[in-house]
Image (cartoon, rainbow, N blue to C red):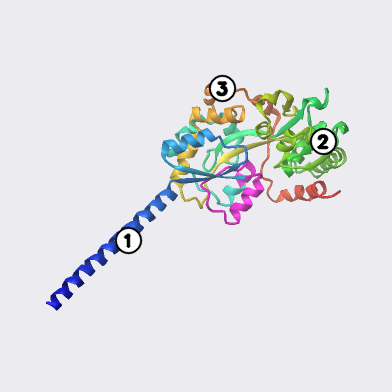
Amino acid sequence: MNHHRTLISYLLFTALFSFLILVTTGCSKDENNGESSKADNTLYLFNWTYYTPESVIEAFEAEYGVNVVLDYFASNEDMFAKLKGGGSGYDVVFPSQDYAEIMIREKMVIPLDHAKLDNLRYISPLVREKATYDPDMAYAVPYYLGASGIAVMKDSLEEYPRDWSIFSDSRFRNRMSMLDDMREVMGAALAHLGYSVNSLNPDELEAATRLINEQWKPNIVKFDAEGFAKAFSSGEFSVVHGYGEAVFEEIEEERWDEVDFFLPGEGGPMYLDSMMIPVTAKHVDLAHLFINFIHRPEMYAQFLDRFRFPSTVHTEAEQYRTTEPIYSGDALAAYELKMDLGENLSLYDELWQTIRYDD
């Protein structure tokens, strides 16, 4: 009898132990699957500040039942350094044309599957013509074609030059800033002198450097690519070189009439930002879905409305937009894309040191 009770106890214990293992394993499996599923349904973006429309992100998340995590960068150099330094968690990145060219050459991005990108048919002929580094969009899908400009607080002065020479105007001394961006600043000076923003002519580069150091730099407070818009909106600066979307993001809409934002008619450096998928991306299919989603005409119109951009990239979005752009796409006619200079970049680097760091 005691043996029988012992056997029954043993069998009950064994059954209970097996049940507990099954339940525990099952819970762990469900939990792990839940975590895996959650990770698989998260898209990681790495984009410029003031450059991602919340409404489009929310619409994408709702339609596909996914989460979008967004990180920001302030310069191509920062973005590139992070990717090179092991920042491998991103599924879509948004470099400008010169860095897109470098990333293609260094095999940092994957070829795109055009079968999953039927909205490429809306990319404008102008952009296809400009994107000489990837004319067939094998690696890069254009996001936006634009340029930096100049913002002036109108109550500063009644009359002022509406071109790059405004930085030579001593009436604005200690109330101006320019972008902390070598190619933007030197490109502006080159264009003002009538040269290409991609010039490799030593005499032209020296002339541009003299112009900046002798006429512009004495009047500006600093080179700033991150805080210029906040400083402008707070009244710290009356004139800033920067991006219109950043300027107007920091100023209440009822004050927009106080701001004169323009692209100098003499031209300057132009940028073409694109969407690319890094080789380290873990959600490639989701990345393709997002890139295609952005270029639905009604979605791209929300991007244009959010930042008051002209429709330079998309052929059909204009009909869906509800706002007026902060500058005309026609103003870009005199502008030139900054291209990768390869080993010749050192010519700029050496001169930039005298601009950026020498007194």
Q: CA distance from mark 2 to mark 3?
A: 34 Å
Q: Is residue 150 magenta?
A: no
- Disc 2 marks a residue whose amino acid type is Arg
Residue that numbered label 1 is attached to: 24
Q: CA distance from mark 3 to mark 1?
A: 55 Å
- Marking on residue 319: none
Q: Give the camera-side residue of 296 and 29.
A: 29
Residue 204 seen in the current view: no
- Could you tell which of marks 3 and 1 lies nearer the N-terminus? 1
Residue 343 seen in the current view: yes
x and y percentages locating residue 37 in the rendered image: 40, 49
Q: Quadrant of residue 63?
A: top left
The residue positioned 46% from the left and 36% from the top of the image is 60
Q: CA distance from mark 1 to mark 2?
A: 66 Å
Span of residues in magenta: 73-101
Q: Decide: marks 1, 2 in contact (CB < 8 A)?
A: no
Q: Give the camera-side residue of 261 and 232.
A: 232
Q: Give the camera-side residue of 185 and 87.
A: 87
- Disc 3 marks a residue whose amino acid type is Thr
Q: Secondary structure at mark 3?
A: loop
* Mark 3 vs mark 1: in front: 1
**Left or right of residue 71: residue 292:** left
Question: 299 above or below 347?
Answer: above
The residue positioned 76% from the left and 49% from the top of the image is 347
x and y percentages locating residue 355 in the rendered image: 81, 46
Question: 176 above or below 78?
Answer: above
x and y percentages locating residue 67 in the rendered image: 47, 43
Q: Secondary structure at mark 1?
A: helix
